[in-house]
Image (tube, rainbow, N blue to C red):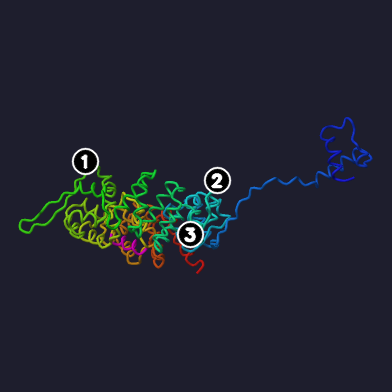
């Protein structure tokens, strides 16, 4: 008697019925109960046949250290409690985790699912794989950490990581970066193409011209528009510049002064542009035009253009947008120091992505020139603090933060707790330099805990994260 004969002789009969009797003699059994018992034992130990093929998930390697226990508890309180952290606190946490090369504990990924999905591309390979777990295999992203990419694997990463890699390569080898983008261009979707093209904005040269001209027939209008804006900024560009033409159509040149005549510029804003959309229109119309290009077209210097627009608030705002996009911080300083004393108001309707190419030091300097908290009046809108945190995207300097704490709007908000909102406390916490966190805690302690508790928790978390991996 063996397992094979039991399976071949007895099991078929048991499954189909035993009216004709069991072939006991073939297996050497003495009665039906014995055959049944033997068949049952056989089924217990008989292994099922293996599948013809396996579908296995690739192992995800994430070399970042897991969040320390103390910081982990604070993070969970902030992100999974009833009063969850705001979007700006969450973004600052993600930035700090990336800076310290830390990742979430795997057990916390399900508890923080909404946070993980919102920031998956910046939380590491493990978090990205978790957020992507229900996506069809054909649509899944690859999980590469930015520091593990090479020229052979960069195109396999997530869109934001790919753009970051190309931006870094553009700084070290502009031609190689452009060639890498050209090689994968046809296989990228519109979002990815837009990011990759934006990553080529730095180090533009005449050698980029053939590639940019080839994008005139790109299937995405926004990609074509960006390519045209980059093309006209190339050294020695000759040809039609639609953006410059549209800007010049709105500028009027005249002369002022009885004896010593000097140029004066004014701006003709279309009647269809309303006050609440004016700044967006100015940025869309003048932002793509370089300051030097506009000055040359007017047969003036850049300083001369600013001086000629001294009494034209809308035109000065347009020049401020242009100087920001051209990274002409000297012009930004002149405009906000001499002409637009509340220059930050012009940026209320705009997106902080305008500073995407700014280094940390440049962004800090821009913030100092634009916001100037030492000049805020008592009735200055609280948006000044919220906007400052939004555009800065991180900590400011001790001098600037000290000016905010001494500013009249902050003192007024502290005195009238009814006007104080949680997003202002969050903004202050995000901007607070590490050396002044104890000072800010003391300032927040006297306010409504319902509006300041998350900001205080955030300060504790930042302290904990900064000591990790030290």
State the predominant SS element of the stretch in magenta.
helix
Q: Earlier in the sequence, mark 2 or mark 1?
A: 2
Location of mark 1 (residue): 271
- Say whether marks 2 and 3 touch (CB < 8 Å): no
Q: Is residue 95 magenta?
A: no
Location of mark 3 (residue): 151
Q: Residues within 10 Å of mark 3 (few under 14, many from 20)?
A: few
What secondary structure is found at the residue carrying circle 3?
loop
Labels 2, 1: front one: 2
Q: In the drawing, does residue 223 fall left or right of residue 240?
A: right
Q: Is residue 408 visible?
A: no
Location of mark 2 (residue): 138
Residue 257 % position (x, y): 8, 56
Q: What is the spatial separation of the Cα atoms under label 2 and label 3, in whole angstroms?
A: 23 Å
Q: In the drawing, does residue 242 fall left or right of residue 202?
A: left
Q: Quick check: 222 above or below 462?
A: above
Q: Is residue 1 visible?
A: yes
């Amino acid at each position: 008697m063996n397992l094979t004969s039991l399976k071949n002789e007895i099991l078929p009969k048991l499954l189909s019925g035993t009216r004709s009797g069991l072939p006991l003699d073939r297996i050497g059994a003495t009665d039906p109960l014995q055959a049944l018992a033997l068949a049952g034992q056989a089924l217990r130990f008989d292994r099922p046949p293996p599948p013809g093929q396996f579908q296995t998930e690739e192992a995800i390697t994430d070399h970042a250290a897991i969040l320390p226990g103390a910081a982990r508890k604070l993070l969970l309180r902030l992100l999974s409690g009833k009063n969850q952290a705001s979007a700006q606190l969450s973004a600052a946490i993600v930035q700090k985790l990336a800076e310290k090369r830390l990742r979430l504990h795997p057990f916390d990924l399900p508890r923080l699912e909404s946070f993980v999905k919102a920031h998956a591309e910046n939380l590491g390979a493990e978090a990205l794989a978790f957020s992507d777990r229900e996506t069809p295999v054909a649509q899944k992203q690859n999980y590469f950490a930015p520091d593990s990419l090479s020229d052979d694997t960069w195109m396999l990463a997530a869109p934001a990581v790919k753009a970051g890699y190309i931006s870094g390569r553009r700084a070290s080898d502009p031609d190689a970066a452009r060639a890498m983008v050209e090689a994968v261009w046809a296989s990228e979707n519109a979002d990815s193409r837009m990011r990759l093209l934006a990553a080529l904005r730095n180090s533009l040269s005449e050698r980029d011209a053939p590639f940019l001209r080839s994008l005139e027939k790109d299937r995405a209008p926004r990609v074509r528009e960006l390519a045209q804006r980059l093309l006209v900024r190339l050294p020695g560009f000759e040809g039609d510049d639609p953006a410059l033409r549209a800007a010049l159509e709105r500028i009027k040149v005249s002369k002022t002064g009885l004896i010593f005549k000097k140029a004066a510029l004014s701006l003709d804003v279309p009647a269809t542009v309303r006050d609440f959309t004016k700044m967006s229109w100015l940025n869309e119309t003048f932002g793509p035009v370089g300051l030097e290009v506009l000055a040359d077209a007017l047969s003036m210097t850049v300083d001369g253009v600013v001086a000629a627009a001294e009494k034209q608030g809308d035109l000065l705002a347009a020049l401020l947008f242009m100087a920001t996009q051209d990274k002409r911080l000297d012009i930004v300083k002149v405009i906000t120091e001499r002409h637009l004393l509340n220059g930050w108001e012009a940026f209320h309707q705009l997106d902080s992505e305008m500073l995407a190419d700014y280094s940390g030091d440049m962004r800090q300097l821009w913030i100092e020139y634009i916001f100037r908290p030492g000049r805020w009046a008592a009735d200055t809108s609280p948006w000044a603090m919220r906007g400052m945190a939004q555009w800065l995207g991180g900590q400011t300097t001790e001098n600037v933060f000290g000016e905010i704490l001494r500013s009249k709007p902050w003192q007024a908000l502290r005195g009238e707790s009814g006007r104080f909102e949680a997003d202002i406390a969050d903004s202050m916490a995000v901007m607070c330099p590490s050396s002044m966190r104890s000072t800010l805690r003391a300032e927040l302690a006297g306010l409504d805990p319902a509006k300041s508790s998350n900001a205080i928790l955030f300060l504790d978390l930042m302290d904990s994260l900064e000591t990790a991996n030290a």
